Image: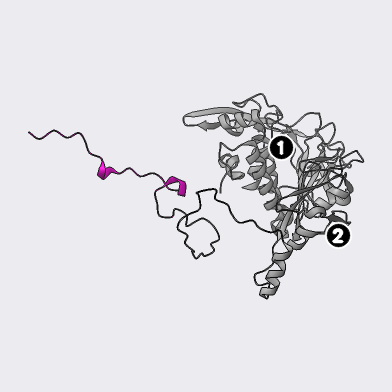
């Protein structure tokens, strides 16, 4: 079984070391959605929950230039107090998460449809945290374009860790005294040597596994009966998530103080939902503007129309009344702009615009059933003037040729070495000759 030290963050997100920030974000979105705990059978959710946390922590490092540079040079040792990278103090606890992935379990937060477990993501390298705010918990949340247009409020049950009220987070019975840990001599942390490259090692400080970094522990008989010495218990709470109308991909919704509690923190961290916009079958979005295809018939392109052309995100029908005076026509790829029918702009009554790209649908073959029908259409359409070649330019010889229809230009230049057909120039080595001496 692989250890935490063997895991490569780039492999975890299926990336190469030269991946751009945009590629890192896309890989994280893909990995987070495919590894979601709610997408696996119930008996596999604990393992999926742990993997999901590891993916989130990997993204936290690789999306930050400084942390990524330190990781590329020193590995995860850069995020431990006293490690080779140094300077990050309260670094991510990815080692602990990966160790659980390949050797243990973890708790989590669940209960919301479409949400994964998020508990147990706190912790810092080099011993337990002492004071300060707890670690935030980041989760992706998929929303439809309709929900972003109208806004959304949803309530869900959250299961998280809270400080045990029975022992007030001490982990022991009343008046019981904790014993100093012999493994770390009460320091809560131990030192180990870790390889960081060929022939290179670093000394790093890690939380003591015997006392979980606390420096002391309670004997089994002295442990709190409610939390069993863990110091926290699981509790359910109904939370409300509000997504303002006009929100967009990447926006963050913060539920302050709703992350897991830790007795060593002054206050718990936040639960942060990062919005992921689902692809829509009709509309494409850019900022506050929307774009859609406007499918019309050839007859409508030539003569105009008055009808509902699409259903908007709030269920309203959008009607267009287009008259074609003086023979004006709608052409393929022509763009019509409708002001104020785009997405709402947050904290404003204004909206973006809607852009409709014209797509003219031509009739099927055989729609003209007779020569009389053909003549009637010709009479209705503008007269086509014959092509003029200019004085003296009329070809002396004219051939009438047959034709066939093809779907694309794949046959164009096929089999040639002409690079304009997608090939490469080839050197004619057989024709290359050196200088020749004159025959005497």
Q: Is mark 2 on a helix, strand or loop?
A: strand
The spot of residue 113 in percent (x, y) is 81, 55
| Span shown in magenta | 414-440
Q: Name the residue under label 1.
A: 212
The spot of residue 252 in percent (x, y) is 80, 40
Q: Counting other residues with Cα less than 10 Å from the Cα at mark 1, is it few (<14), some (14-19), or many (20 or more)?
A: some
Q: Nearer the viewer, residue 315 or 105?
A: 315
Q: Nearer the viewer, residue 45 or 311?
A: 311
Q: Is mark 1 on a helix, strand or loop?
A: loop
Q: In which quarter of the image is the C terminus?
A: top left
Marks 1, 2: nearer the viewer: 2
Q: How far apart are marks 1 and 2 (CA)?
A: 72 Å
Left or right of residue 199, residue 35 in this image: right
Check the image and report above or below for 43 versus 253: below
In the image as oriented, which residue stretches furthest toward the right?
Answer: 349
Give the number of marks: 2
Left or right of residue 165, residue 120 in this image: left
For the stretch drawn in magenta, what is the main secondary structure?
loop
Residue at 53% from the left image edge and 62% from the top image edge: 406
Residue 306: mark in rendering: 2
Residue at 69% from the left image edge and 63% from the top image edge: 362
**Residue 330 lies in the magenta-colored region:** no
Residue at 50% from the left image edge and 65% from the top image edge: 402
In the image as oriented, which residue stretches furthest toward the bottom?
Answer: 370
**Residue 424 lies in the magenta-colored region:** yes
């Amino acid at each position: 079984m692989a250890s935490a030290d063997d895991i490569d963050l780039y492999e975890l997100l299926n990336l190469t070391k030269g991946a751009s920030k945009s590629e890192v974000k896309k890989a994280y979105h893909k990995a987070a959605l495919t590894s979601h705990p709610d997408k696996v059978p119930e008996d596999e959710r604990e393992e999926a929950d742990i993997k999901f946390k590891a993916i989130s922590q990997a993204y936290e490092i690789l999306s930050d230039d400084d942390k990524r540079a330190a990781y590329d040079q020193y590995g995860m040792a850069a995020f431990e107090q006293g490690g080779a990278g140094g300077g990050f103090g309260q670094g991510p606890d990815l080692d602990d998460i990966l160790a659980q992935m390949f050797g243990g379990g973890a708790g989590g937060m669940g209960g919301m449809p479409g949400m994964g477990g998020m508990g147990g993501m706190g912790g810092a390298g080099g011993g337990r945290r002492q004071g300060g705010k707890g670690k935030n918990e980041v989760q992706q949340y998929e929303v439809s374009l309709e929900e972003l247009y109208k806004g959304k409020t949803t309530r869900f049950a959250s299961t998280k860790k809270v400080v045990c009220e029975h022992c007030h987070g001490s982990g022991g019975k009343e008046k019981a005294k904790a014993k100093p840990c012999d493994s770390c001599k009460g320091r809560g942390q131990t030192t180990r040597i870790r390889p960081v490259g060929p022939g290179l090692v670093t000394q790093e400080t890690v939380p003591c596994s015997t006392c979980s970094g606390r420096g002391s522990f309670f004997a089994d008989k002295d442990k709190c009966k409610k939390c069993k010495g863990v110091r926290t218990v699981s509790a359910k709470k109904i939370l409300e998530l509000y997504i303002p109308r006009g929100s967009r991909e990447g926006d963050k919704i913060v539920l302050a103080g709703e992350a897991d509690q830790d007795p060593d923190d002054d206050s718990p961290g936040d639960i942060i939902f990062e919005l992921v916009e689902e692809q829509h079958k009709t509309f494409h979005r850019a900022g506050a503007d929307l774009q859609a295809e406007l499918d019309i018939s050839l007859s409508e392109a030539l003569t105009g129309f008055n009808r509902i052309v699409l259903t908007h995100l709030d269920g309203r029908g959008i009607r267009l009344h287009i008259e074609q005076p003086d023979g004006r026509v709608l052409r393929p790829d022509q763009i019509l702009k409708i002001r104020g029918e785009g997405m709402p702009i947050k904290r404003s009554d204004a909206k973006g615009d809607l852009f409709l790209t014209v797509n003219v649908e031509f009739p099927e073959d055989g729609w003209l059933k007779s020569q009389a029908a053909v003549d009637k259409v010709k009479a209705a359409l503008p007269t086509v003037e014959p092509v003029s070649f200019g004085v003296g330019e009329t070809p002396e010889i004219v051939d009438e040729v047959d034709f066939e229809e093809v779907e694309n230009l794949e046959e164009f230049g096929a089999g040639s070495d002409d690079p304009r057909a997608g090939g490469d120039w080839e050197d004619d080595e057989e024709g290359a000759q050196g200088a020749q001496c004159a025959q005497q």
